[in-house]
Amino acid sequence: MRILLIHSDHIEYEARKKTKVAEEDAVQKDALDEALAVFCAVESVDEENIEDAVRQTADEIVTTARQLSTTNIMIYPYAHLSSDLASPDAAVRVLKGIQETLAGTGDLVVKRAPFGWYKAFSLSCKGHPLSELSRTIVPGEGAAAPKKEIEHEFFVITPEGEKRDPADYAEGETPFAALIRKELGYPGPEGAEPIHVDLMRAKELVDYEPRADVGNHRWMPRGKLIRDLLTDYVLMQVLDYGGMPVETPVMYDLGDKAIAEHAAKFGERQYRFKSGNRDMMLRFAACFGMFSIMHDMHISPNT
């Protein structure tokens, strides 16, 4: 987050023209006297922890307002402060969050210019030593991010379509029982490397690639043959079940709300990059493309 704080005698704006990401139901024209004008550019890094970006920015604004003995705040989206902007949806969430947090203090008058509009504005800066300040805010910096508690429900679906308690399958020495115990978090051997790691190396099947990122593998001839045969077997099972193969892109645009929301649910390791002005990511699963295809399908019953 980049912010420019201007202590002003007067600030006013008027929204003139919408962009394709313009907020609807926006306040088209407004003004404040004796105000702290806060020009904000929400950056891509803020999407990693929106709550902390809001909290830190609001704290900085309150601290500055107290120093300047002003209670009037005008939040003004200003993308020109950064070249690494957040997605429009994330930016609006952050700006609204800042507005709500400041308003929640109870003693501040808070107004916000609309996001995604071309606006005319006039500003009269007071010109004293603290009248022009800039800040760069990085979410999570200086404090550990709060651990998110996520509720999970595990169950087993039988081939007959019945929903069963996985604990019913956790006993015994079958591979399926071992899988259930692992998914349910049952205690296992501590400190030792999983047995399959030694096996995959000893049999010259697959190994970690030291010249790639963590978790990426290189497949030797035997391993690739086995993997390809397993892939063929799974494909045959899916085809017998009625599945239809498709192919989807390896990268997706994070500016799409559905893509961004889905990606945010899996934040451990993602490969993101810029393509022109677009924030892109390499997909880590096929569901991005599957959902996109299903969204555009017209399905009619077989007659």
Image (cartoon, grey):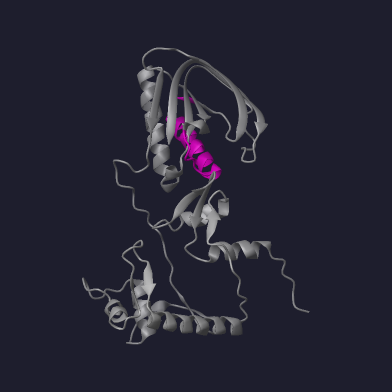
On the image, which quarter does residue 291 sit in? bottom right
Q: Is residue 273 above or below residue 5?
A: below
Magenta span includes 108: yes
Residue most extreme to the bottom: 173
Q: Residue at x 36, y 26 (%)?
A: 63
Q: Residue at x 47, y 81 (%)?
A: 228
- The answer to which of 248 and 78 lies nearer the viewer is 248
- The answer to which of 211 and 269 lies nearer the viewer is 211
Residue 107, can we see it?
no
Q: Residue at x 39, y 58 (%)?
A: 269
Q: In the image, 296: left or right of 115?
A: right
> The C terminus is located in which quarter?
bottom right
Q: Position of residue 289 (x, y in %)?
A: 58, 63
What range is drawn magenta here? 82-109
Residue most extreme to the left: 191
- The answer to which of 134 and 63 lies nearer the viewer is 134
**How many badges with numbers are in the image?**
0
On the image, which quarter does residue 298 sit in? bottom right
Q: Is residue 125 above or below residue 167?
A: above
Q: In the image, 255: left or right of 145?
A: right
Q: Position of residue 93 (x, y in %)?
A: 51, 41
Magenta span includes 126: no
Q: Position of residue 154 (x, y in %)?
A: 43, 71
Residue 132, can we see it?
yes
Q: Position of residue 178 (x, y in %)?
A: 34, 81
